Amino acid sequence: MSDASNVTPEVDERIKTRSRFREALIRPELGGIVGTAVVFALFLLFAFDSGMFSSQGVLNWSQVSAQFMIIAVGACLLMIAGEFDLSVGSMIGFAGMIIAIFSVTLGWPVWMSIILTFALCIAIGALNGFIVVRTGLPSFIVTLAFLFILRGFTIYLPQTIERKTIIGGISDAAEGDWLAFLFGGTLFKGLFQWLGDQGIIETFTRGAREGQPVVDGIPMLIVWAIALVIFGHILLTKTKFGNWIFASGGDAEAARNSGVPVNRVKVLMFMFTAFCATVFATCQVMEFGSAGADRGLLKEFEAIIAVVIGGALLTGGYGSVIGAALGALIFGVVQQGLFFAGVESSLFRVFLGVILLAAVILNTYIRRMITGER
């Protein structure tokens, strides 16, 4: 009698189950979680008494992190869809300058200037996507071209119109404007005043602001960052469109054969990236009350680095908005933490490079270990 009947059939790889621990190890957020824990541990150890974790210190690094988060959400979804946008930084400078020209130079209402700027920038994002999907050119090349085009216009327009590269006066123009508040306002002032009165947070002890809280509310920049992270996470993990994003970046041809509108997905992701860049620009303009031609420099690379630290693959089809948000948090904490710790600020890039390399190696090693990839 043959022994074939005694051979145990192999379990199909597609239905093999993994423990929760093993599933957690291959989550894209792993590198971001580990990096965040390490960074906070280091600064709690070396900068705890520096004021970094006071209410003002927390606000400082939270605002810097929020800036990175806003553009990282758009970059993350686009990278998961298999594309890059290197024009994000130039889009930030361009959007801020257009708002300034519309509102200060031309004298239009700020709310109208903001809406028209959003429409223009989203249209440019759609053009980026349209060129990529129609020509088949790498998005790296197309958006690199727009990086120079938008930066050139950002410098040329104010020089031609105002004979300068910085346009101020936006704060005065935005006074009492309802839409300007959504980008430059502060929420929960009453709550923070109460916290100050109760001694829970620091208050000024002298001067004209004596008795007022050092931190008087939550800036809209932070609110936008949290809202975009929540929106991006829900879109990616809870909707059919989120599955389309993963499919478009994983295997575009197979996705098309399965009925996924890959081209539409990619164009919409370019538009969303432009939207996020414009949100950043508008918040920045309202905060400083001016627009400068040099705003947004290198922000495209910082967004991509935050996304990669958060576990996304450069090849597309894999990533997490939560991971990207953690990568942005690492950015903000390290940048401000070095100042509080008394470390030379130029070392920020060194720390950033080390964190990036460590996160990528960790994510790659763990994923290969668990999945058996070579």
Image: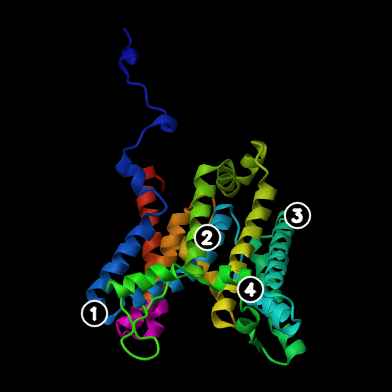
Spatial CA span between label 2 and label 4: 27 Å
Q: How would you rate the neighbour count of disc 3 (Cα within 10 Å): few for under 14, some for 14-19, many for 20 or more?
A: few
- What amino acid type is highlighted by mark number 2? Val
The picture places residue 152, in percent across and down from the top left corner, at 71, 80
- Front residue of 290/253: it is 290
Spatial CA span between label 2 and label 1: 33 Å
The picture places residue 175, in percent across and down from the top left corner, at 61, 79
- Going from the N terminus, do you reach mark 1 or mark 4 first? 1
Viewer can see residue 142: yes
Q: Secondary structure at mark 3?
A: helix
Q: Quadrant of residue 257?
A: top right
Q: Secondary structure at mark 2?
A: helix
- State whether the magenta stretch is mostly helix, strand or loop: helix
The picture places residue 150, in percent across and down from the top left corner, at 69, 75
Q: Quadrant of residue 146?
A: bottom right
Spatial CA span between label 3 and label 2: 25 Å
Dots 2, 1 in contact, CB < 8 A: no
Q: Is residue 49 magenta?
A: no
The picture places residue 332, in percent across and down from the top left corner, at 41, 72
Q: Is residue 352 magenta?
A: yes
Q: Which residue is mark 3?
A: 134
Q: Which residue is mark 2?
A: 73
Image quadrant holding the N terminus, namely: top left
- Going from the N terminus, do you reach mark 3 or mark 4 first? 3
- What amino acid type is highlighted by mark number 4? Asp
Is 20 situated left or right of 312 in this image? left
Q: Which residue is mark 4?
A: 177
Q: Which mark is residue 49?
A: 1
